[in-house]
Every structure is written in structure tokens, then in C-alpha cells.
């Protein structure tokens, strides 16, 4: 496995965990129930795990870095908006 895939996967995982926590906080804020936050967290975790596996194993270089930049940008915008 190439080194750039490991770096991209680590960056995606770190920003994805922050994004998952932000999504859980938004779900709890909107609905006020812990069960909604847990469901949002589970869905986010599965989506993140699939995306990291695709980055590590399948996607071409350009698509990998586009995904990393998009997730990082999303986290930045959500952190600034909250």
C-alpha cells in the first residue's frame, strides 16, 4: 500500500471523526433525544468506515484527495458555523 494512501486515510479518519461528532451534536440539538444522536452517529460511522476503506484500497489518487479536501472543508465550515 502506498504511503500517500495511508496519509490520506489518516487525514480522512481524523476529520471524519470530528464530522461524526458534529452530526451527533446537531441531531441531539434538533430533536433533543439521545437515541437520535446515536442513530446519526452510527450512520455517520458506517459511512466514514466505508469511505476510508475506499480511500485505502480502491479510489484513484485524484478522487482520494478530492474526498479528503471536501470532508475537511465540510468540517471547517460546520465548526465555524456552530
Image (cartoon, helix red, strand yellow):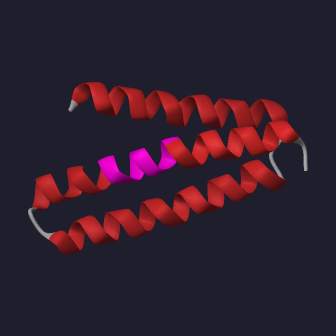
Q: Is residue 17 magenta?
A: yes
**Front residue (pair 61, 21):** 21
Could you tell whether 17 is left or right of 30 in the image? right
Q: Residue furthest bottom?
A: 35
The part of the chain drawn in magenta is 15-22
Could you tell whether 59 is left or right of 13 in the image? right
Name the spot of residue 20 as percent of width and height, x first. Answer: 40, 53
The residue under the point 80% across, 46% down is 59
Could you tell whether 23 is left or right of 13 in the image? left
Specify the quadrant of the image occupied by residue 27: bottom left
Q: Residue furthest right?
A: 1
**Front residue (pair 58, 76):** 76
Name the spot of residue 76 as percent of width and height, x first. Answer: 40, 27
The residue under the point 30% across, 31% down is 79
Name the spot of residue 6 as percent of width and height, x first. Answer: 77, 45
Name the spot of residue 58 as percent of width and height, x first. Answer: 83, 52
The secondary structure that most of the magenta stretch takes on is helix
Specify the quadrant of the image occupied by residue 67: top right
The residue under the point 29% across, 70% down is 38
Task: Give the position of the C terminus as an image quadrant.
Answer: top left
Could you tell whether 64 is left or right of 78 in the image? right
27 lies above or below 34 = above
Q: Is residue 42 magenta?
A: no
1 lies above or below 66 = below
The residue under the point 54% across, 60% down is 47
Amino acid at each position: 500500500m502506498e504511503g500517500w494512501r495511508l496519509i490520506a486515510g489518516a487525514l480522512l479518519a481524523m476529520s471524519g471523526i470530528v464530522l461524526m461528532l458534529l452530526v451527533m451534536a446537531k441531531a441531539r440539538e434538533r430533536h433533543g433525544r439521545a437515541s437520535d444522536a446515536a442513530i446519526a452517529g452510527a450512520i455517520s460511522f458506517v459511512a466514514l468506515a466505508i469511505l476510508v476503506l475506499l480511500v485505502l484500497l480502491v479510489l484513484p489518487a485524484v478522487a482520494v484527495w478530492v474526498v479528503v479536501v471536501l470532508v475537511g472543508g465540510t468540517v471547517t465550515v460546520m465548526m465555524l458555523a456552530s
